[in-house]
Image (cartoon, rainbow, N blue to C red):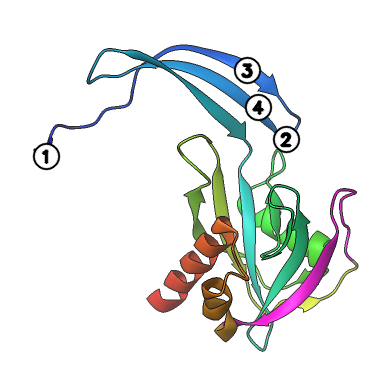
Amino acid sequence: MPINNSELIPWPLEKSLCAGDYKIFKVRSDRRTSPRTGDEHDFFVIESVDWCNTVALTPDNQLVMIEQYRQGTNLIELELPGGMIDPGEDPLETAVRELREETGYAGDTPETVGFVYANPAIMNNKVHTTVIRNATRQHNTQLDAGEDIVTRLVAINDIQRLIGDGTISHSLMVAALFRFQLAENAD
């Protein structure tokens, strides 16, 4: 099969309609035209706010993590603290707020590590990763009504094993931890 070396370009948008509004996300129906074939195709896009994951390190280099039940998988997942970025907030503010609300921990000024797109095939949002060092428990938790969370301290050296054995299986947590590892190794 020959390799096509032509340049890709975004598909022109012909029409866009709201297909549903579901409180924490909307579904948009887009009709786009393939530049290659000229054919029109319908696509559905989940419009969701950006969110932020926080890699919080204690003074003795343990990660502050949480366990919580996830309805989509019907599993209790080991994850980083995090959540949706509220209107008017930036990812660094969200990192501090979510860490405090979900774990009661606070620490040094947050640092940006980077972001990934949650799932660019069907979603339009970014997931930011931040680092907060010297995190210690300083507050009571403030869980949302739909959250049941347990805080766990995890040795940073255990992360690779926990990803490898599937204990940490949430793809966005794996991506955040990899971004953190890249940032740490760059120093």
**Horizontal and vertical percent for residue 140?**
91, 67
As shown in the figure, which amino acid type bears the numbered disc 3? Ala
Mark 3 burial class by Cα count in 10 Å: few <14, some 14-19, many 20+: few
Disc 2 target residue: 24
As shown in the figure, which amino acid type bears the numbered disc 2? Ile
Circles 1 and 3, Cβ within 8 Å, touching? The answer is no
Q: Which sits in the foreground, 61 or 162?
A: 162
Name the secondary structure under disc 3: strand
Nearer-N-terminus badge (1/4): 1
**Horizontal and vertical percent for residue 12?**
35, 17
Disc 4 target residue: 26
Separation (CA) of disc 2 from disc 4: 7 Å
Circles 2 and 1, Cβ within 8 Å, touching? The answer is no
Disc 3 target residue: 19
Q: Give me the residue at 55% from left, 57% from top.
A: 171
Q: Give me the residue at 45% from left, 36% from top.
A: 121
Nearer-N-terminus badge (3/2): 3
**142 magenta-colored:** yes
Separation (CA) of disc 2 from disc 1: 41 Å
Q: Is residue 39 above or below residue 70?
A: above
Disc 1 target residue: 3
The part of the chain drawn in magenta is: 141-156
Q: Quadrant of the C terminus?
A: bottom left
**Camera-side mark, 2 or 1:** 1
**110 magenta-colored:** no
Q: Quadrant of the N terminus?
A: top left
